[in-house]
Image (cartoon, rainbow, N blue to C red):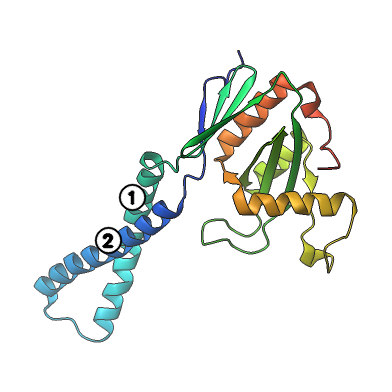
Amino acid sequence: MTPAAGRLLLADRFHTGVRLTAMALWFVSLLVVYALLHLIVQALFGPLVGIGVLLLIVVAVVVAQPLAYLAEKQLMRRWPSGRAMLLEPGLLVWREPGSEVRLDLRQTVNFWRWRFAIKRRRGGRIPAGHHLFALRLVQGDTVVSLYTFLAPAAAETLAAACAFYELRRPSEHGKLALGGREALYLTAEDARWRAGAELDPADFQALLDHLAAHLPEFGRAPASGL
């Protein structure tokens, strides 16, 4: 049994429900903090007007940020999306709400790995300069696309340890190539964008380690076709 066997990798922790609830909690935190600060300041210095109100709003925003951040972290831990990968000896089990598929690692599993740099900040959560690392697993009719985001230093470490095809985005070379490896990986990337599942960096690494322990060819360069 590999060290990761039996581990459940929760996917899409920052799902829509978490995002919307976190936004609502931030707004509520802002109102509560502002009301409390307003009562305290008014009791000490009297009624606030003009610039005093503006400064109080700024302070409330600053104070509410860490509270909302902590609430978001708790939501991500306690409110799973329902999508997850279970690592078992010789097996991967992919779970979606209402369904489950298995990839037998003792049989042939086709895989493709690719990465690219994030040029612009994504949704206020992924800074520009981070890298997306993606993995596509195919066995028969079963197709699973998983990915993670890594800071530059962590991206360099992973790229040095495991070969990922460096994907050029269409904007970097003007138009989508009509053939060849680039177009094939862009097709895989489009599928990932539509239906892929995000893993935390540590869980993505655990998945790579599990695959490397069961698939001797996993340490080689990524395949050139889909």
Q: Earlier in the sequence, mark 1 or mark 2?
A: 2
Q: Secondary structure at mark 1?
A: helix
Q: 168 or 65: nearer the eye?
A: 168
Q: Which residue is mark 1?
A: 71
Q: Is residue 225 above or below residue 107?
A: below
Crowdedness near tag 1: few (<14), some (14–19) or many (≥20) residues, C-alpha within 10 Å = some
Tell me which residue sits at (58%, 58%) in the image: 127
Answer whether residue 130 is visible to the viewer in this image. no
Q: Is residue 216 left or right of residue 123?
A: right
Mark 2 Cα within 10 Å, few/some/many (few <14, many 20+)? many
| Displayed quadrant of residue 45 | bottom left
Coordinates of residue 77 in the picture (x, y in percent): 39, 40
Residues at marks 1 and 2 touching, judged by CB atoms closer than 8 Å:
yes
Q: Is residue 12 left or right of residue 45?
A: right
Element on which disc 2 rests: helix
Give the labeled residue for mark 2: 29
Coordinates of residue 116 in the picture (x, y in percent) = 73, 52
Displayed quadrant of residue 200: top right
Residue 63 locus on image (x, y percent):
31, 61
| Residue 112: % across, % down | 76, 39
Which part of the image, by quadrant, shows the C terminus? top right
Q: Nearer the viewer, residue 43 or 216?
A: 216
* Vertical arrangement, residue 139 with respect to residue 190, above or below: above
